[in-house]
Image: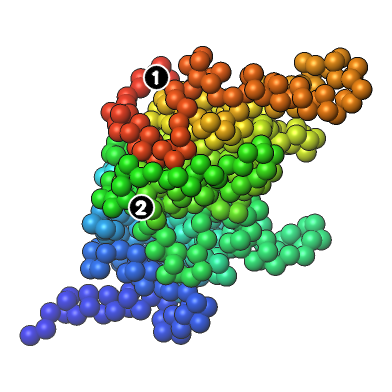
Amino acid sequence: MTNPRLEELRARLRRIEAMGGAERVERQHQARKWTARERIAYLCDPGTFEEIGAHVHHRGQGLGLGGVEAPADGVVTGYGRIDGRVVYVYAQDFTVLGGSLGEMHAAKIQRVQDLALASGAPIIGLNDSGGARIQEGVDSLNGYGEIFKRNTWASGVIPQITVIMGPSAGGAVYSPALTDLIVMVRGSAQMFITGPQVIEAVTGEKVSAEALGGADAQLKRSGVAHLVAGDDQSALSLVRHLLSYLPNNHLEEPPVVESDDPMNRIEPGLREVVPIDPAKPYDVLRVIEAVVDRGSWLEIQPGFAENVVVGFARLGGRPVGVLANQPRVLAGTLDIDGSDKLARFVRLCDAFNLPLVTLVDTPGYLPGTAQEYGGIIRHGAKVLYAYAEAVVPKLTVILRKAYGGAYLAMCSRSLGADLVFAWPTAEIAVMGPEGAANIIFRDEIARASDPAQKRAEKAQEYRERFAHPYVAAARGYVDAVIDPAETRPRLIAGLMALYNKHEVRPPKKHGNIPL
């Protein structure tokens, strides 16, 4: 004898599994996009995802949705495991009402946000949505607001990662912007506040959705995105990789892995990386990749503010955040975008207990009216604030130029660096030798028969007397001048010594970072 309730359950589950139906699923696949359940199945360890809220349905009455079938109300929510660790997931499905967010759709997302925060587990959002569900009006807007609030509560407590896998417009972009890391899929993902049609109607500008808010635009021009992938599979693999550097929550240490890269590995090639000519550029990525565990480097925001480099890596199997000036772009100067990039990454690492390794080679802040009018003072102060606020172990290596305020900003001893190393090529001074010579020896240079030659002589004299690393070491601002080849073992030894570092700061509600 059949159980009618059980048969009804099975029928309901079949409809839910089908989501928007075969035709819409096929259109999704033709657009090189997976469905919500296909994405979750790949993201989580096989067989570990447990769905919650599958039977939730929009209320529909008086909203123009009466009788409209919307399985799971267009979003799949639940929990699963990634490399054995519990994660909470929500995935919007474009095959159901365009993945639009209504009252109950939002309530499901809020539910997993609350569970993730309460249990101290990461949350991953897979966004593919046409935005607010117009038929539900202010209830949709309220749903977004409740999600934003929970994003803010969870900030710095649990890792929040968003993958933009389709359209994301208007209010829908603000939840991703409040999370820690955004991955976008090239070709299918867009993010913008106002779409191309509205922009053309209001300003007369003509722009495509891809040029306006596509993955490359948001990675390289705005800096909103942190990583870009070529397809759904690559994007979800990136998320799994990102989580390998992050703890479950702010009370735990990042996951340590076994490394087959010797901790005492010497890299003789580092002695030749930095050119003798202080004006000659080089690629700091060569230094990073030679120092960290082989194969562990993951650059964040590549292509944006390329005068600075940030990313995750491991040293002796332990995750760290690496920040560096990039001498081959704008000579490694600090500018508005570079400052924002550095400050945000410092705070991300500090929130989740990743030690900071800073490699310094900067002649200062980028000069010019565009920078001054754009607020380089305010933006540059973010870097000072972030480093001084951070309580994780902080190790700094001065590779070459470290001048003026930029020397201070790049995690100097003054801002709380626990250990500061310098290569013999380091130049630490208030300003570059040429600029200093122009000021200190101005009269002598003016009287010389060959001012250019005299200026060069005085600059070299200043460099030899004041700009070498032993002056700063004599004052205690540099802990050791090291052989570049020994950088890796020195950093690992420093990290091990600082493993139990603990700082107590004055109690306060919160600081007021210069935003």
Residue under the image location 61 percent in, 61 percent down: 216
Residue under the image location 52 percent in, 50 percent down: 286
Secondary element at tag 1:
loop
The reply to whether residue 147 is visible in this rendering is: no
Q: Is residue 278 above or below residue 1?
A: above
Considering depth in this image, is 94 or 102 the residue closer to the camera?
A: 94
Question: Which amino acid type corresponds to the residue marked 2 in the rendered image?
Answer: Leu
Image mark for residue 243: 2
Location of residue 38 (image quadrant): bottom left
Quarter of the image with the C terminus is: top right
Tell me if 461 is positioned left or right of 229 in this view: right
Question: Which amino acid type corresponds to the residue marked 1 in the rendered image?
Answer: Arg
Q: Is residue 127 above or below residue 400?
A: below
CA neighbours of label 2 inside 10 A, class few (<14), some (14 to 19), many (20+): many
Q: Which residue is mark 1?
A: 505
Secondary element at tag 2:
helix
The reply to whether residue 275 is visible in this rendering is: yes
User: How far from the left and from the top, in percent, is residue 336?
Assistant: 66, 38
CA neighbours of label 1 inside 10 A, class few (<14), some (14 to 19), many (20+): few
Image mark for residue 223: none
Verify CB contact (< 8 Å) between mark 2 and mark 1. no
Tell me if 54 is positioned left or right of 30 in this view: left
Query: Label 2 vs label 1: CA separation?
Result: 29 Å
Considering depth in this image, is 186 or 335 the residue closer to the camera?
A: 335
Considering depth in this image, is 332 or 184 the residue closer to the camera?
A: 332
Residue under the image location 29 percent in, 58 percent down: 82
How many numbered circles does the render carry? 2
Q: Earlier in the sequence, mark 2 or mark 1?
A: 2
Looking at this view, name the residue that lies furthest to the left: 1
User: How far from the left and from the top, in percent, is residue 504?
Assistant: 35, 20
Q: Is residue 511 above or below residue 108?
A: above
User: How far from the left and from the top, in percent, is residue 53?
Assistant: 30, 61
